[in-house]
Amino acid sequence: MNPRIFRSSPLLALAVLAACAAEPPPAAPVPEPLPPPPVGWEPIPSLNTSGDIVSGYVQRRGLVRTGPVRRAWLLLNLREPIPIPETGGRALSVRFVGEYRCAQREWRPLEGAWFARRNAQEPVHAERPRRGSFRPAAPGTLDGAFLDAACSL
């Protein structure tokens, strides 16, 4: 390069020096690998993962897929953490055993647990066994996601 160019244009000289001194941008963070699902849980291939749910698993032991009321242990991994009102914490994974009335779009959660990491890792809240009545499970809600998963089996 011709040194006379830098004498006639000090701003150009500063720009060249600044470009040479700049550090390369930091490397993009490597995403944390997803832990495996709990032993004995199988993927739910029919699960809709276009919304808030990333993946889901069913525990085949104790699964009831016939009759007016289905019963299943389901594990759903969430796209984004959601708040847990009882603790103030956040969860990326939730697991419930519930009974499901597919035709009426109702479910009755029986027992559940919330986890800080996907695939039921790092428990942050457990819901005690309960025996309430069936309640609506509207599409686009977490309740609806559980119902849709159970009814797709």
Image (tube, grey):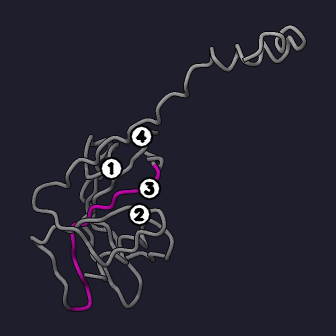
Q: Which secondary structure is most common in the magenta stretch?
A: strand
- From the viewer's perspective, is residue 111 above or below residue 58? above
Marks 3/1: CA–CA distance: 14 Å
* Residue at the spot of label 2: 53
Label 2 or label 3, whichever comes before in sequence order: 2
* Residue at the spot of label 4: 87
- From the viewer's perspective, is residue 112 above or below residue 62? above
Question: What stretch of residues is rendered in magenta?
Answer: 67-80
Marks 3/4: CA–CA distance: 20 Å
How many marks do you count on the picture? 4
Q: Nearer the viewer, mark 4 or mark 2?
A: 2
* Rendering coords of residue 131 (x, y %): 27, 67
Q: Identify the element where label 2 is drawn.
A: strand
In the rendered image, residue 134 lying in the magenta stretch gets the answer: no
Marks 2/3: CA–CA distance: 6 Å
* Residue at the spot of label 3: 79
Label 4 or label 1, whichever comes before in sequence order: 4
* Rendering coords of residue 3 (x, y %): 78, 10
Residue at image position (25%, 45%) is 121
Residue 44: image quadrant is bottom left
Residue type beneath disc 2: Ile
**Could you say which disc has been placed on residue 114 in the image?**
1
Residue at image position (38%, 49%) is 92
Q: Identify the element where label 4 is drawn.
A: loop
Residue type beneath disc 4: Thr
Binning the other alpha carbons within 10 Å of mark 4 as few (below 14), some (14 to 19) or many (20 upward) gives few
Q: Nearer the viewer, residue 124 or 4?
A: 4
